[in-house]
Image (cartoon, helix red, strand yellow):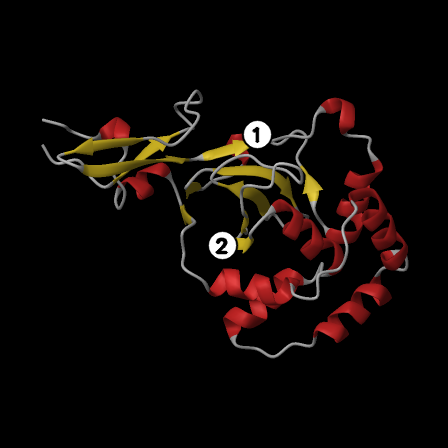
Amino acid sequence: MDIPKKLIIDIEDKDNAIGYFYTSEDGEKSEAVLAGKRVIPVPENERSCEIYKLLGENCDVIFCTTQIRDDFRFYPVPQFSIFAVDTKGNCFGTIGGIGDIKDDNYPVGYVNRNGMFGKITDSFKEFLELVAYYPHWQEVIRCEQMGESYDLKAMEIGERENNSQYLARQREIQEILKVSKNPKSIELLIANIQGKKEFLVYSSKEEAQKTNTFLDICSFD
């Protein structure tokens, strides 16, 4: 009996799947990878907190409240826990599990409305540092992928000119979240988007099944 080295478990159909495990055949290990989407909304009793308003207004990061899984028409491998969207129809989530600024074990990725996707930071804290001080990071990605030149200082000046409250809100975000500007944020962003693609996004589960072996469709005969 042949068992693939990597098996995919769909969390969208199996919401009680909670982790990774291994099975072996003649000493060969087979890794089980959780895949699919979760939406992690802000608890109702926290939605009025000022930080969510500030991140939406200054960084175009709108934390999930009423969004549901069916709002996002794609299928990720490994699992993608969506915690925020933006005004352009893009979404952000942790890759491989659910994490936050205190439990910082998972990288953060994005999926945009045009089907582009990728890991952007190695942790949720790095994500907050990126969006708080470089809200133009998506334009940096576009320029990098199109081979166009860009000027970070000019981008920051543009943020200030277009948003009279930009610096004041930035200081409030810094105070509330206890984050500071990381001068390497853009360098780390570029390294992530140019690195090995371990986060993949398909148009549907059916499309993912063409190149991955799902545990629920495996034959062990």
SS class of the residue under badge 2? strand
Pointer 1: residues within 10 angstroms few (<14), some, or many (20+)? some
- Would you say the residues marked 1 and 2 are in contact, meaning their CB atoms lie under 8 Å apart? no
Name the mark nearer the viewer: 1 or 2: 2
Residue type at mark 1: give it: Ile
Circle 2 Cα neighbour tier, 10 Å, few/some/many (<14 / 14–19 / ≥20): many
Q: What residue does disc 1 label?
A: 68
Q: Is residue 190 above or below residue 110?
A: below
Q: Residue at x 64, y 52 (%)?
A: 126
**Where does residue 27 sit, x and y in percent of width and height?**
16, 37
User: Which residue is labeled 2 in the image?
Assistant: 118
Instruction: Relative to 185, say whether 123 is above or below.
Output: above
Q: Secondary structure at mark 1?
A: loop
Residue 208 percent coordinates (x, y): 32, 42
Rendered view: 70 above or below 116:
above
Residue extending farthest to the bottom is: 149
Identify which residue is drawn at 82% across, 48% down: 173
Residue type pointed to by label 2: Gly
